[in-house]
Image (spheres, rainbow, N blue to C red):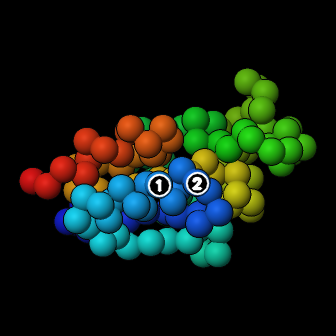
Amino acid sequence: MTDRITIWHNPSCSTSRKALEAIRAAGHEPEVIRYLDAGWTAEGLGALLAEAGLAPSAALRRKGDLARDLGLLGPEVAEDTILQAMLKHPTLVERPFVRTPRGTVLARPLDRLIGLLARS
């Protein structure tokens, strides 16, 4: 892990905007990845989920109709099925993810991020 902070950001999301503001207010200028534009790779998303200690189902954006329409909400849905859907439809990944030198979190709620932003 580097000293760099990275945020996977959706500027349309208020929580993502607040996370970016909190990072900057703590004196950091993060690398901003607009994942809806960039998309995901299987390796990249898999690593991010592993760093955060989350299964794909725990990072699935359930708000809106897409996850339901794709049949991803049931307990019987395999994690790999959810991951493959996330790769095809980046909007299915909950946001924002933030990687810091102290750890990686899905910063929803935003409180998960605050402890990671303190300067060493």
Residue beneath the point at 25% across and 58% down: 26
Element carrying mark 2: helix
Q: Position of residue 38 (x, y in %)?
A: 60, 75
Q: Residue furthest left?
A: 120
The one nearer the camera, 81 or 17, is 17
> At x 25% / y 41%, what residue is drawn?
115
Q: Amino acid at mark 1?
A: Lys
Q: Are marks 1 and 2 in contact (CB under 8 Å)?
A: yes
Q: Secondary structure at mark 1?
A: helix
Q: Position of residue 45 (x, y in %)?
A: 53, 57
What label does residue 18 carry, if any?
A: 1
Point out which mark residue 14 bears.
2
Residue 39: quadrant of the picture: bottom right
- Crowding at mark 2 (Cα within 10 Å: few <14, some 14-19, many 20+): few
Q: Quadrant of residue 4?
A: bottom left
Residue visible at 60% across and 48% down in the picture: 94
Q: Position of residue 2 (x, y in %)?
A: 22, 66
Above or below residue 78? Residue 119 is below
